[in-house]
Image (spheres, helix red, strand yellow):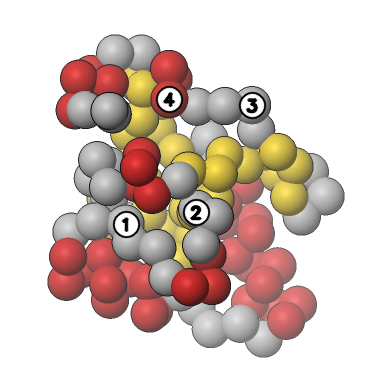
């Protein structure tokens, strides 16, 4: 069982760019929650710049709505090897068992450089 203990050792900050629907859910519940569209887990990256870059590409390239930056802290012990998304961004897929113990932090800007 994954417990809060893991959140205190060798912490790493992970970032995720979210659309308004996910932001609303985080604001209402204070947690990351899975929805049917992301049943395997949620993707996070270790770089705010990479998360921001992804959001900007989706906004300008695909006409997506605006994104908001979310971060969380996690023990490195809980991370598997990252996968590459969008060509180059290293991403960690976090399953529900890990998501439910994380605390999201909402940032006021997407402008990370």
From mark 1 to mark 3, how far is it between C-alphas?
21 Å
Q: Describe the element under mark 1 as helix, strand or loop.
A: loop
From mark 4 to mark 3, how far is it between C-alphas?
10 Å
Please say if the residues under marks 1 and 2 sit with CB atoms less than 8 Å apart.
Answer: yes
User: Which label belongs to residue 42?
Assistant: 2
Farthest residue to the right: give it: 87
Counting from the top left corner in percent of width and height, residue 32 is at 32, 57
Q: Describe the element under mark 4 as helix, strand or loop.
A: helix
Q: Nearer the viewer, residue 44 or 95?
A: 95
Dot 2 or dot 3: first in sequence order is 2
Pointer 2: residues within 10 angstroms few (<14), some, or many (20+)? some
Residue denoted by label 1: 32
Q: Nearer the viewer, residue 53 or 72?
A: 72
Q: Residue at x 65, y 59 (%)?
A: 54
Dot 1 or dot 2: first in sequence order is 1
From mark 2 to mark 3, how far is it between C-alphas?
15 Å
User: Which label belongs to residue 78?
Assistant: 4
Pointer 4: residues within 10 angstroms few (<14), some, or many (20+)? few
Counting from the top left corner in percent of width and height, residue 55 is at 59, 65
């Amino acid at each position: 069982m994954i417990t809060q203990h893991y959140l205190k050792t060798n912490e790493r900050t992970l970032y995720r760019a979210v659309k308004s629907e996910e932001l609303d859910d985080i604001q209402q519940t204070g947690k990351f929650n899975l929805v049917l569209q992301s049943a395997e887990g949620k993707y996070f990256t270790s770089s705010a710049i990479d998360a921001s870059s992804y959001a900007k590409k989706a906004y300008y390239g695909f006409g997506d709505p605006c994104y908001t930056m979310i971060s969380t802290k996690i023990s490195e012990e809980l991370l598997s090897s990252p996968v590459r998304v969008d060509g180059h961004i290293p991403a960690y897929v976090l399953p529900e068992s890990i998501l439910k113990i994380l605390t999201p932090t909402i940032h006021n800007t997407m402008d990370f450089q």
